[in-house]
Amino acid sequence: MVCEKWSIFSHICSDCQTNLLLPTLHKRKILGSIPVYSFYPYDAIESLLLSKHTDIGYYIYTILAKNSLEKFAKEWSYETPVASIGIDDHSKSGYSHTAVLNRALKSKTITPYYGKLRATKHYKYAGKSVEERLLNPREFKYLPFLEEEVILVDDIVTTGSTLSEAVETLGMQGKRVILCLTLADAQNR
């Protein structure tokens, strides 16, 4: 898909995965103190991110998750069990891209949960201003889970408004978001 070299077992050949999909962590904060870590500059994987609502999107997101979030989960340690929650992980095009990313975080201390934070309003944020995003909140519906500390997972962070709203929704339920993970940060171009 990237170099157009034939690859039997993957949509992106192993050379391109090794050479082009090497994560470089970028950090920013939302709500003053919550770190948001992104694995790639947006421009470096934009065409791959745009595959999310196509037939091959599931495979591309699985590869991106393996090369970033799965590696993070293997190296990250924490003292207590933590839940990971994909932002609005309902299925589109036959799968949920945030669920694919979230699944890659499964480890000894991280338990991925699905369907625990779903938007009740599905306004398209792509290309919208911060003001328009704030005027059209997702209004997340929360379903209970055991852990008190949470990692939020999304594919792209742009303004941080969706992650911030999710943090606030979880906070009202007594949950504490300790960090957020995204594939790309649109501000990191």
Image: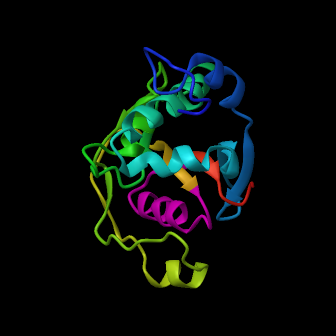
Q: What is the image's colouring?
A: rainbow
Query: Can I make out residue 181 in this image?
Result: no
Q: How many marks?
A: 0
Residue pushed farthest top?
A: 8
Residue at 73% x, 54% y is 28
Residue at 54% x, 43% y is 48
Q: Nearer the viewer, residue 87 or 76?
A: 87
Placement of the C terminus among the 4 image quadrants: bottom right
Q: Up-down: is 5 above or below 158?
A: above
User: Which x, y percent locates residue 103?
Assistant: 40, 31
96 left or right of 32 in image: left
User: Which x, y percent locates residue 68?
Assistant: 59, 30
Check residue 187 for magenta coloring.
no
Q: Nearer the viewer, residue 44 or 182?
A: 44
User: Which x, y percent locates residue 181?
Assistant: 58, 44
Query: Can I make out residue 49 in this image?
Result: yes
Where are the magenta residues, as a range? 157-178
User: Which x, y percent locates residue 58?
Assistant: 37, 37
Check residue 158 for magenta coloring.
yes
Asked which quadrant contains residue 129, the reply is: bottom right
Q: Up-down: is 124 above or below 10?
A: below
Asked which quadrant contains residue 23, the reply is: top right
Residue at 64% x, 25% y is 16
Asked which quadrant contains residue 84, the reply is: top left
